[in-house]
Image (tube, rainbow, N blue to C red):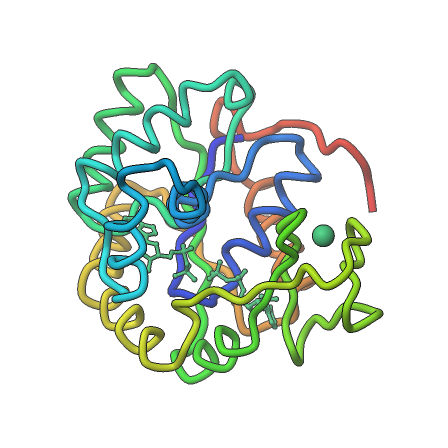
Amino acid sequence: MRIILLGPPGAGKGTQAKRIADKYDVPAISAGDLFRARIKDPGDPLGKELKEILDSGALVPNEITVKMISDRLDQDDCKNGFILDGFPRSVEQAESLQKMLKEKGIELDAVVQIGVDDDKLVERISGRFSCGECGEGYHDKFKQPHDPSTCDKCGAVDKFTRRSDDNEETVRDRLHTYHTQTAPILPFYEERGMLKTVDGMADMDDVTRQIEAVLKAEKGPNAHNSPKKFG
Ligand code: ADP
Ligand code: ADP
Ligand code: ZN
């Protein structure tokens, strides 16, 4: 399975990428997570520059982003497939990705767009937090942990964190970046017959089911990794 998840900030890409990744045993690759890992590393000379860009809501320059994704796709765990979350985010990146995949001899199976209305996105992002230990995502209203201080998934206590760019002002800038730079890649994939759209306004389980239905319908050469488990 080799798929891209597309959608505005807060659409549920990360949530769905992790679920599909767990179920089909392929890695979920988030461009944003790769940047945040570098920001967290005090020895990384790029960290400070990346933090400023992420906090502004703009896109990280292509030279950095494309190389980082290309290197990630070369790792062993991507051999049976991958889910790309948050890349590509511009027509230029989509073109670089086509070229990169061709060079690596890889074909994409599907590009899944998670559609959500803008006014819902601000609510989704302002309520978002995650576990600093295992990365599990939560929401103040839509997905609360059973115990307010404990991660349901890994049991870590008092490890919840919020992203510094998940504030209302940066969200507006990120939405603007999405509409001006990222949305133009939708026709790029539509023209190639690859674009599938799911209704991201539905609840999380429903969105997962919709994505799985898209994947089952795909006829691509690598589309059918077997699920690890059922249910
Ligand atoms: P993205 O990766 O697209 O920015 P996330 O997956 O991080 O989005 O989701 C943003 C926030 O909204 C998270 O707090 C998540 O728990 C919540 N969320 C995700 N999908 C849904 C959904 N279908 N309904 C309600 N809340 C959702
Ligand atoms: P979200 O989906 O909620 O916007 P991400 O974690 O995907 O969050 O992205 C966070 C930030 O990382 C973006 O606002 C942008 O600054 C940077 N970023 C993520 N993906 C890309 C990309 N493909 N190209 C350039 N910058 C990116
Ligand atoms: Zn955890």
Is residue 28 toward the left or the right of residue 183 in the image? Answer: right
The one of 145 and 115 positioned closer to us in this rendering: 145
Is residue 128 toward the left or the right of residue 148 in the image? Answer: left
The one of 231 and 97 positioned closer to us in this rendering: 97
The one of 25 and 218 positioned closer to us in this rendering: 25
Using the rendered image of the protein, determine whether residue 104 is visible from the camera's viewpoint. yes
Where residue 230 sits, quadrant-wise, is top right
Q: Residue at x 50, y 60 (%)?
A: 198
Q: Residue at x 73, y 72 (%)?
A: 144
The one of 89 and 164 positioned closer to us in this rendering: 164
Image position, residue 110 (x, y; %): 44, 40
Using the rendered image of the protein, determine whether residue 85 is visible from the camera's viewpoint. no
Image position, residue 63 (x, y; %): 17, 36
* Residue 229 higher or lower than 126, as above or below: above
Image position, residue 229 (x, y; %): 81, 36
Image position, residue 166 (x, y; %): 43, 71
Is residue 108 toward the left or the right of residue 81 in the image? Answer: left
Is residue 113 toward the left or the right of residue 186 in the image? Answer: right
Q: Residue at x 62, y 49 (%)?
A: 213
Q: Residue furthest bottom?
A: 119
Where residue 174 sits, quadrant-wise, is bottom left
Q: Residue at x 68, y 39 (%)?
A: 22
Q: Residue furthest front?
A: 43
* Residue 168 higher or lower than 158, as above or below: below
Quadrant containing ligand 2 reads: bottom left
Q: Quadrant of the N terminus?
A: top right
Total labels drawn:
0
